[in-house]
Image (cartoon, helix red, strand yellow):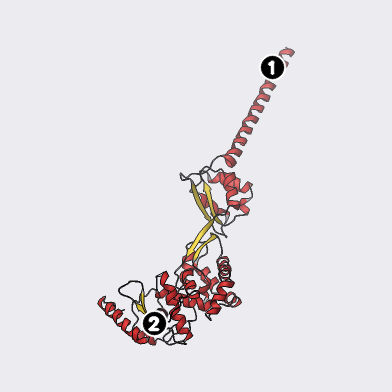
Amino acid sequence: MMKLWFKKHYMYKRKILKTIVLLGMLVGIYFTYSFYRVFFMPNTAFSNSESYVFISNDASFTEVVSDLDNILLSVDDFKLAAIKKGYSERVKGGKYIISNGLNNHEIVNVLRGKNTPIKVVFNNQERLENLAGRISKQIDADSLTLITAFRENEFLELNNFTKENALSMYLPNSYEFFWNTTAEGFRNRMLKEYNLFWNPTRLEQAKKISLSPLQVSSLAAIVQKETVKIDERPKVAAVYLNRLKKRMRLEADPTVIYALKISFQNFDTIIRRVLKNDLRIESPYNTYKNKGVPPGPITMPDISSIDAVLNPDSHKFLYFVANPKQPGYHTFSKTYWQHLRNSKAYYRWINSQKLYR
């Protein structure tokens, strides 16, 4: 009887032990699978080859998780992986590319340090306000933060700019930035690019025509407004430089249009024709009343316009007027009487087009 009892007891203990081992194995398998699922199982829910995630500098982990909700199969698994890897306490702003098929371990690594640069492009901006609006559509900083940085008095004074000529600092081109670049970071980078642009060669060219870099930009803006034809810009630039040498007023219609827009407080106003009465407007930008170049650019001059001023044609023309027979180009003259004759032909054409304003 005792042997039978011990045998049954032994068998019972083996069953319990086997059950415990089996349960342990099942628990181990479950945790192993859970670990694998959380960290190494693909967790993307989109069909494209990649998806973009934009994270602001001040974004919280909760906001990041919310942004990822539409592209992940399991947000909860991502949260577990991110917390375990310490990402939840060290969120970094930027633009990130999440490739299809990535697991949470890889996704967290991307968000930790693979901020992807973007191309920022701008040109033809008439004012700092327009530039701020354009840039705010390309990086995280909003237009109000950008315009505040652009107009910061301390920055302008430190770098010898004024609010009138600060637009000169922003050279139209294509630049590489991180999406989470701050307003100050963007502005400071543009200052660096401006200083690189004005190298010793360009500074020497400006000196030869007796203009400072800021005056070159102001004159280049007028040249750009006068002609859209890049090949004609050195010729137009030379006319204005000839007039400056003779201490003549520039008498550039685009400066009057700019002054009118300021007086209207509406830069969306379209003015196709400058009237005689417009020439009387009191403004430092009115080059019919003031000698020299305006206090700042009337638009953002591109590099071709700046280089046209620095490398003008050599001629003795002092006047020009639009050429109706060659749209986009102008007719040039050395004397006022020649100019009057050319102007009459132009005004006959413009009246025939019924352009009265």
Instruction: Classify the position of the C terminus by image quarter.
Output: bottom left
Between marks 2 and 1, how big is the CA–CA gap?
119 Å
Q: Nearer the viewer, mark 2 or mark 1?
A: 2
338 vs 147: above or below: below
Graded by Cα atoms within 10 Å as few (under 14), some (14 to 19) or many (20 or more), the crowding at tag 1 reads few
Residue for badge 2? 319
Residue 273 pos. (x, y %): 33, 79
Graded by Cα atoms within 10 Å as few (under 14), some (14 to 19) or many (20 or more), the crowding at tag 2 reads many
Q: Residue at x 59, y 56 (%)?
A: 92
Q: Residue at x 62, y 54 (%)?
A: 90
Q: Compare residues 85 and 208 and report the one nearer the observer.
A: 208
Residue 225 pos. (x, y %): 41, 74
Label placed on residue 8: 1
What secondary structure is marked by label 2?
Answer: strand
Residue 27 pos. (x, y %): 63, 33
What secondary structure is marked by label 1?
Answer: helix
Q: Residue at x 50, y 52 (%)?
A: 52
Identify residue type, mark 2: Tyr
Identify residue type, mark 1: Lys
Q: Tell whether 190 sits left or right of 257.
A: right
The number of numbered badges drawn on the structure is 2
Which is nearer the N-term, disc 2 or disc 1? 1
In this rendering, does residue 330 appear at all?
Answer: yes
Which residue is situated farthest in the front direction here?
315
